[in-house]
């Protein structure tokens, strides 16, 4: 009987030993699995954080992440660049970081209300330019439904504001340019319908009406030209063009106008200078610039057209010896409806769109156009075009 008890005890000890060993193995395996899971989770979390940070830092919009007290947790690269702030803003309040009461108001509204959409702020004298931002913000809740923080996204809408202002100015300028000839045509037409028939007076009135109708036609044609150039829908028929011959054709067309003011026009462009351009559009550019030189140059003076190849480009210049263009106006002469001398420009019959058309045509060819003072003290318009290598 004793040996049975001993055998039972031995078996029991063996079972206990095996169970203990198995438990240790399971614990070890569990520890290995948990360690592997923790490592995998940490790796995935690191990758997600790195991916999120990469997305945040690559955003064109400025992003500001705040805690529940309105202190900065993260400001992405665009935010730091837009508002000229450094990495040291982390941990500061919005007022300390940006010093803008308007942004502080948006933060407080977001924390109180949960969301703010399309709030606008204006930042003056940032790099010497007033900039406008549209701000969208949202409150970040925590797991218990409380407030964990807030996120603000800043969209730079300065360009949109500038386009809106340009559109308003354009509409105002077009309205102004149309009003004068329309009023004159209407006035003379009403006079003709009520006055006694007089052949000489009727002829004079009809001539005036025709002149202003031509001005309206020119204005509409120039507006359509600019619209086509700006939309990119006006194709350029590029081909080798002799600049000397193009200049000469314009000179022949304007010979009578040059003779009327006793202005000598000199074509000093080499006959070998050839560009890759749309012949008709290049003719339009040269016509506009040479015509302006004849209008605003000195009577009994001289207009000189020169050309050369400079750094793989064709450089063409048209110089006059008139009163010139003030330095502060040289950057704006290519704007639509900008006039240095408004009274004189309208007197000369221009639409105010000629130089804007010149700029768009030259840019469509991949060139540049600018104005500077000529050696004779007048204006010197310069433009570049691609060289023809055929």
Image (tube, rainbow, N blue to C red):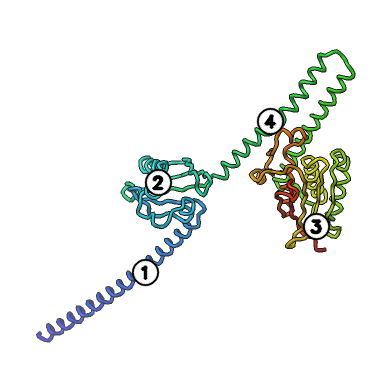
Task: Give residue 340's mark.
Answer: none
Q: Counting other residues with Cα less than 10 Å from the Cα at mark 4, is it few (<14), some (14-19), or many (20 or more)? A: few
Element carrying mark 2 = loop
Distance (Cα) linking label 2 and label 4: 43 Å
**Viewer-side residue, 194 vs 46:** 194
The answer to whether residue 189 is above or below residue 23 is: above
Asked if residue 146 lies left or right of residue 350, the reply is left
Residue extending furthest bottom? 3
Q: Which residue is label 4 attached to?
A: 176
In this rendering, the label closer to the viewer, 3 or 1: 3
Q: Quadrant of residue 219?
A: top right
Q: Which residue is label 3 attached to?
A: 275
Q: First in sequence: mark 2 or mark 1? A: 1
In the picture, which quadrant includes the N terminus?
Answer: bottom left
Task: Give residue 39's mark.
Answer: 1
Distance (Cα) linking label 4 and label 3: 39 Å
Q: First in sequence: mark 2 or mark 3? A: 2
The answer to whether residue 53 is above or below residue 206 is: below
Q: First in sequence: mark 4 or mark 3? A: 4
Q: Residue at x 74, y 24 (%)?
A: 183
Asked if residue 285 lies left or right of residue 260, the reply is left
Q: Which residue is label 2 attached to?
A: 99
Is the residue under label 1 in contact with that under label 2 (CB below 8 Å)? no
Distance (Cα) linking label 3 and label 1: 66 Å
Q: First in sequence: mark 2 or mark 4? A: 2
Element carrying mark 4 = helix
Tell me residue 7's x, y (percent). 15, 84
Tell me residue 149's x, y (percent). 36, 49
Distance (Cα) linking label 1 and label 4: 73 Å
Q: Residue at x 80, y 45 (%)?
A: 290
Tell me residue 62's x, y (percent). 47, 51
């Amino acid at each position: 009987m004793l040996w049975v008890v001993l055998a039972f005890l031995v078996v029991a000890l063996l079972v206990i030993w095996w169970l203990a060993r198995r438990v240790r193995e399971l614990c070890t395996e569990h520890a290995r699995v948990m360690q592997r899971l923790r490592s995998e989770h940490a790796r995935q979390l690191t990758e997600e954080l790195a991916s999120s940070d990469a997305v945040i830092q690559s955003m064109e919009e400025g992003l500001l992440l705040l805690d529940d007290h309105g202190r900065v947790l993260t400001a992405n690269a665009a935010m730091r660049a837009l508002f000229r702030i450094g990495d040291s803003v982390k941990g500061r309040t919005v007022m300390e970081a940006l010093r803008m009461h308007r942004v502080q108001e948006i933060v407080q509204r977001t924390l109180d209300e949960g969301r703010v959409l399309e709030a606008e702020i204006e930042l003056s004298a940032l790099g010497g330019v007033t900039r406008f931002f549209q701000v969208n913000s949202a409150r970040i809740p925590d797991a218990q439904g409380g407030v964990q923080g807030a996120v603000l996204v800043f969209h730079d809408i300065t360009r949109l504001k500038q386009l809106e202002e340009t559109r308003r100015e354009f509409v105002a300028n077009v309205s102004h340019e149309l009003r004068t000839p329309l009023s004159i045509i209407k006035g003379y037409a009403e006079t003709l319908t009520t006055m006694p028939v007089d052949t000489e007076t009727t002829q004079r009135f009809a001539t005036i009406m025709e002149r202003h109708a031509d001005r309206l036609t020119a204005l509409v044609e120039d507006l359509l030209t600019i619209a086509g150039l700006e939309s990119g829908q006006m194709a350029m028929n590029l081909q080798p063009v002799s600049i000397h011959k193009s200049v000469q054709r314009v000179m022949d067309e304007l010979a009578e106008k040059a003779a009327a003011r006793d202005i000598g026009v000199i074509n000093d462009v080499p006959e070998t200078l050839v560009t890759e351009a749309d012949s008709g559009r290049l003719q339009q550019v040269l016509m506009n610039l040479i015509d302006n030189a004849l209008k605003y140059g000195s009577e009994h003076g001289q207009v000189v057209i020169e050309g050369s190849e400079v750094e793989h480009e064709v450089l063409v210049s048209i110089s006059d010896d008139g009163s010139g263009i003030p330095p502060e106006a040289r950057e704006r002469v290519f704007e639509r409806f900008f006039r240095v001398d408004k009274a004189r420009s309208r007197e000369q019959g221009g639409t105010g769109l000629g130089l804007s058309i010149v700029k768009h045509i030259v840019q469509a060819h991949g060139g540049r156009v600018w104005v500077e003072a000529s050696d004779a003290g007048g204006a010197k318009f310069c433009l570049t075009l691609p060289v023809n290598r055929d």
